[in-house]
Structure formats: structure tokens, C-alpha cells
Amino acid sequence: MAGWTWEYEGYDPAEVRLRESLCTLGNGFFATRGALPECVADDVHYPGTYAAGCYDRLTSEVAGRHIENEDLVNLPNWLPLRFRLPGEPWLTPDTATVLDHRETLLLSAGLLERLTRYDLGEGRVLRVRQERLVHMADPHLAALRTEFTPEGRFGALEVEAALDGGVTNAGVARYRDLDGRHLTHVHSGSTVPDTVWLRCRTRTSGIRIAQASRLLSEAPVTLHEEKPRAAQLTRLHLTAGRTATVDKIVALYTSRDPAISDPLHAAVDRVGRVAGFAELVESHRTAWGRLWRRGELDVPGEAGTILRLHLFHVLQTLSPHTADLDVGVPARGLHGEAYRGHVFWDELFVLPYLNLHFPEVSRALLHYRHRRLDRARTAARDAGRRGAMFPWQSGSDGREEAQQVHLNPRSGHWVPDHSRLQHHVGSAIAYNVRQYCEATCDTEFLHTKGAELLLQISRFWSDAAAYDPILGRYRIKGVMGPDEYHDAYPDAPGPGVDDNAYTNVTAAWVLAHTLDVLRDLPEPRRRELDEHTGLDRSELERWEEVSRALHVPFHDGVVSQFEGYGKLAELDWRDYRRRYEDIRRLDRILEAEGDTVNRYRASKQADVLMLGYLFSPGELRGLFRRLGYGMDEATWRLTVDHYLHRTSHGSTLSGLVHGWVLARDRRAEAWTFCQEALRGDIADIQGGTTGEGIHLGAMAGTLDLVQRGLPGLETRNGDLRLDPVPLPELSSYGFTLRYRGHWGVRLRLERGRVEIAVPSSGPGPLDVRLPDRTARLQPGETGHLPLTD
């Protein structure tokens, strides 16, 4: 099927880590990197399996201090399956001659195929074909089929399959000085001759983990004790032209799973009830077919193929199975150990897509935040604030997981990490509450958990804002904006900057939006909320005042990233590009030179321009007007131009935001940034980071660029609002969405028109608003609406 496969040809050790990340298979409960089953973790290969929400906390000595880190745990490796001629070394692409090698990701079916031909000498060639799945229908199952076909005269082939409990977290080079031994009490055994099991637990969180594996072979299967592995052996007799097949079926459970008494019993019982590999493939394909229908996307050419790959990885991290779990959005998916599997603000880029396809998953991800509301309130109290201060990095229980120091690999220095000052994560949560509720009309959530989140986040912003009588405005000091390069003023004794524009404007929006939500609450629920939180009229009056009087700094006619930004030095961008070529991580370059990026007007990624990503032009003008500032088209264009030339794009999110903003501004260069966002992981533009885990926010953001950005789609007050951007490079595309009970609304945009088909099973008419007209479409009706440029 054209555009539904992702393929790698040939064996290149330098590309292995990248391929392993992009060939990861998962189902929202767990995922396994696309490592070759015959290879162990080393400088080239890194097999890794991660279960959503399975964290463990260890203490390491770093730069003379003891540092706690909570990691998403690398679970026992279920993949190992190696083979050899009797008495000879095990075959791997690194130790044997490879004639051909190909890896193919079948997106439509959720399968990874691998084909390798090994030259064994003396005219003997071994053809190895494998098919792998992590089951999308039953989230606890995975399977590997291996077919051995000899070419030339052959005899016996020894095959060993194993469960390996001797793994550590070692997938990110700069973390290797930290303790990564998370598994302990590793035990193994067998039940029936074809089944082995392995159990262990995490060292501090005490999560019990169990795996069971069945090996199905045409030859007898024997057990092989080799702790900390549970191994099985089979000896195949190969004859030329005849294929011998070995199937490995695995079940994985943890003590965090619902409706079980013991993970080991559950794993052994489940793996024993599987009829075989073919049965698993059939139900797995069916489950993936349902997901593709709900996330249907019709974009032509290479862009369409990349978008399907992005959706594939989003769904492997956040599938309908996620709705049953207490997990957030891991910034690097379940694809590796970068960022230690932590939850940042990336849901800001992920939920807008999920809201319109898998709203039950969005709701679960918002529940993750609500369950940690008390922890966020504790953090605020400890900081001397009211309300809820959500952490920049979150893990199992919602405490702040951001690092105190981080390693600059360019200089080898451990430098202070002040990213925990990015309090705007609270505004991102509030924004997602609004977006989810608008898309779903889930008033039950909005009136209960949603209102509680909004109230406590607003309470924090109101308390953080201090009145400045000289300015006659409120100010929020000592923060860090989305840019992340500026964590302090030059030569300042402490960290933080004042009045970050993005932080202040979004805080004003949160306060205003929360006031609207509270006004619309049913009176009995409002009374409950007031009683539970101690909310009174005087506090609401302060929110109203702060929401209209937060300070937004300007310089030279443009919005300043923060107060004092306009006084910083200009960087010689041309010189740094000449000397270093790739300056995406300009902060590391300058630190290695004994300098600091805090001295310059230089940004890692979009900061002020993030406002144009979150809010439509009309909504943004309204926000600035409420704050008492003018924001006409000319001012915004000058602001965009200013930062466009002063951003190094050290994050995969940067190209996405710039492409979105420039497209809305109808700039010719928009597609260049859109392409960078599309290619961020497949081209590994951040220099090796994709091999440590994909960038989930950027992948989901590209999907949302097609879903909301280019069509100008907004879900507001029960209407679908469209204001499409005519992008020459993508003039025809379509997608399906789920909106307020309508399953399968189809939109297709062509030059000069938009076609909208409302399913006949919908709950009622659908109102569609274009800039110059409104249309009401009945269930079963298709509308063809002309567009004006």
C-alpha cells in the first residue's frame, strides 16, 4: 500500500540507534525498541522495553553532590533470539558477513519485518526473516516469528530464545555516570516444557514485573539455566530451500495493572492461552484498522507518509489502552530513555490532536494531572504561594523531577539546571482543559475536575503576580520562559527573569477563562467548589484585576521576550554559523567557550511566538486588548520577524511553531519550517537525539498542523470554525475527526473550497463557521463550501 511502509535498506551501525527508535512497536501500555533480537546492548545496539508509568528512583553522586533521579525503567528484555551453527559463535550483523539486510515497518498492520541474509562460507547462506508485533488488541502480549531458510548445503542450526533480566538503564550516554540498575530480585523458572518465566521488581518503587514466554518450534524445546536470563534452546535441522519457523510469544504484566492478583500468574496464564502467532496477527491487524479509521488522514506525497509514521508513533505511546492507566505524556514516547521518560508540557502539542479522535485518552491524561493536584498545591505552599504549582518535569507522583545539574557534552561540565522555573506548565494544563472540553462538550469533567484544576492554577498566578506602583501593573518575577536559553540576567546573583511575555499573557488568559467557567457553573456545583476551596468574591475580584493589568514588556515596537531583553547584546550569528555550522544548541557552544547565552538576544525555540501558536489572530488581539495593549497586524509581524532571525531552533518543537505562525501570517517561508517539523526525527536534525527516543510533541504537532493549523480549525461554543490557509505546497488534503458525539466527520480542503461530510449517525446538526458565512449541516449531509482568499 503506497505511503504505508517505512523501510531501511542495508546494515549501517551508525544508523542503528535511529532505526531502533523509529521502528519501535508499542500499544500504549508498553513498547519495545526495534533492536535486532540477536544483538545485545552495546555501543551500537540498544534493546529496550518500557511500560507506561513504570518509574523507579535512585540516588547518584554527581559533581560532588547526591542527586535523585526518577527514571522510566528499562524492563527485562523479551526480544532475545539468537542462532548459530553448532560449535560456532552466535551470528550478528557485527560478527558475520551480511549479504542483504532490510527492515520494514508496516504502518497499516503495526508490524515490523526484518530480512537478513548471512554468508556463512563454503557456499552456505542463511536467510532470516522475522515478523514482530506488540499487540494492539491485548496490551499485555507481544510476539516474534522467525523463519530460517538455508541456501546451499546445511545441517543443524541452534536457536536460543530468552528473557533477560540483567538489563540496566544505559540508553543515553550522558546519563551513564548515574545509577541505572533499577531491577532487583530477578528469578526465573518454567511451567510446561515450552514456557519459561522471569520475575523481578524495581529497587525503590517496588513495582513487581513478570514476563512469560512460549517458544513454538518444530523441534524439541529444552530449558537452559543462565541467570539472570530464562533461556530455551531448540535445534533445527535445515535443508536447502525449506523454511523452518520458530515463534516466540510473550506476556508482560506489572503490579500496577488492574484486575490481577499476581503479575507472574497473569503472565503465565495469558501466554498459555494464545493459540498461535497467526491468531495474534489477525486480531492485531483488526485493532490497528480501527485506530486508522478513527485517525484517518489523507495527505499526498512524502508529507503524507511521514505524517502516518508520526501518527503511528503517537498511537503506540497513547492508545485507547492509555485511558485505563494513570500516566501522562512522556516527552520522548515509550521509545527510549531520554529525559528519563518524564512528563513535561508536551501534552500542549499532543492533546489538541487526540481531542478530535481519541477524547477518552485526552481525558485520562488530564486525570493524570488532576490526581497530582494536591502535590502541586503542596509545591506551591513550599514556595510560599497559594494554588497549584505544577512541576516542569513530572513522573510517578507529581513531584518536581527536573534536574539540579545537567551535563554539557561539549564541555564536559556539569552546569546548574533552572528549568524548574518554567511555571507556564500550569497554563498549558489549563489550555488543554479548555481545548478538551470545547471539542467534547464534556461538561461533567469541566464542572468537576476541570474547574478544580483551573481554579488552583488561577490562584497560583494571582498570588505570583505582585503589583508594581511605578508601572501601575502586576508583574511575575523569577521565571523561565519556553525559550529555555535565558534562565537568569547577565551577572545576576540568582536565576530567573521577570515578566516573560508568554508566561504573563497566558496567565492573564487562564485567569479570564477561569472566571468565565466559574460564572457558568451550575449553582449547586459552584457552592460545593466555594466550600471546598474557600473561594470568595474578593479573590475573584483580584483575578479580574490581575487578568487586565499584567505587565507585557515591549522594545523597539515589538513584544519583548521578558523585561530587559531589549538591553541584551546582539549575537554575531554569521560568525557562529561559520565556525560551528550547527548551532542549534548554542547554549552548549557558548558555555564551552566560557560565555553564556544569557547575555544575548538568542532563543533556543519559539517563546513569544508560542502565543501565535496557541491563540488565533483574533483571540490574541483580544487578549492584548484586555491587558490594555495594542496588537495590530503590523506589530505582530514585526514581532515575528524579530524572533525569526534570533532563534537557533534547538528543539524539534521550534520548527513546528514557526511553521504554524508563518502559515497563519501567509508567509512564503512557512513550508520550510513545516518540512523541518516533519523531518525532525526521521532526519535526526537534533544530532543523535532521536536514537534516545522520538520527540512525541513534535510528531503530534505536525498532525495538528494539518488538522487545525492549516485549516484554521477552532472548536468554539459548539461550532466548528474554519479559516483555511492557502499553502501552495499542500493544496489538497483531508482528514476525519470526532466532534461532540459526531463520529467520523470528514473534511477535505481543495483549492478554493472545503468539503464537509457529517455522518448520518450524528446526534444533530453541525454548525460550521467560515470567515464570511455559516452553514448548518444535517446528519448524513455533505456540504461544499467555497472559500474566499
Image: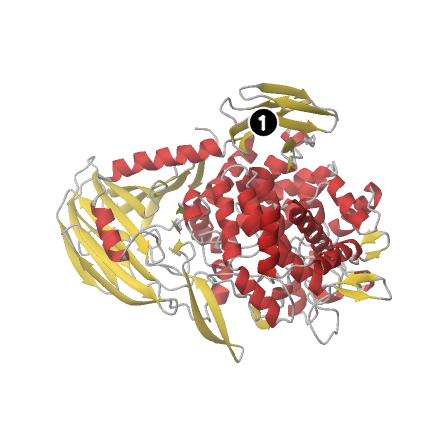
Q: Residue at x 27, y 65 (%)?
A: 186
Residue topped by disc 1: 747
Please indicate whether residue 237 sits to the left or right of residue 776 in the image. left
Quadrant hosting residue 467: bottom right
Q: Find numbered disc 1 in the image and state the secondary structure of the residue it sits on.
A: strand
Q: Is residue 696 above or below residue 576?
A: above
Please indicate whether residue 362 sits to the left or right of residue 608 in the image. left
Q: Is residue 780 above or below residue 459?
A: above
Q: Residue at x 59, y 35 (%)?
A: 707
Is residue 379 something one can see in this rendering?
yes
Q: Residue furthest bottom?
A: 64
Q: Quadrant of the C terminus?
A: top right
Three-letter amino acid code at disc 1?
Leu
Please indicate whether residue 591 sits to the left or right of residue 165 in the image. right
Who is closer to the viewer here, 329 or 550?
A: 550
Please indicate whether residue 395 sits to the left or right of residue 35 in the image. right
Q: Is residue 636 above or below residue 727?
A: below
Q: Position of residue 752 (x, y in %)?
A: 69, 22
Q: Residue at x 16, y 56 (%)?
A: 223
Q: Position of residue 571 (x, y in %)?
A: 76, 60
**How many residues crowd around disc 1 within 10 Å: few (fewer than 14), some, or many (20 or more)?**
many
Who is closer to the viewer here, 251 or 120?
A: 251
In this figure, which colouring scheme has been used for the structure? secondary structure
Is residue 453 something one can see in this rendering?
no
Q: Position of residue 470 (x, y in %)?
A: 87, 66
Q: Position of residue 622 (x, y in %)?
A: 77, 44
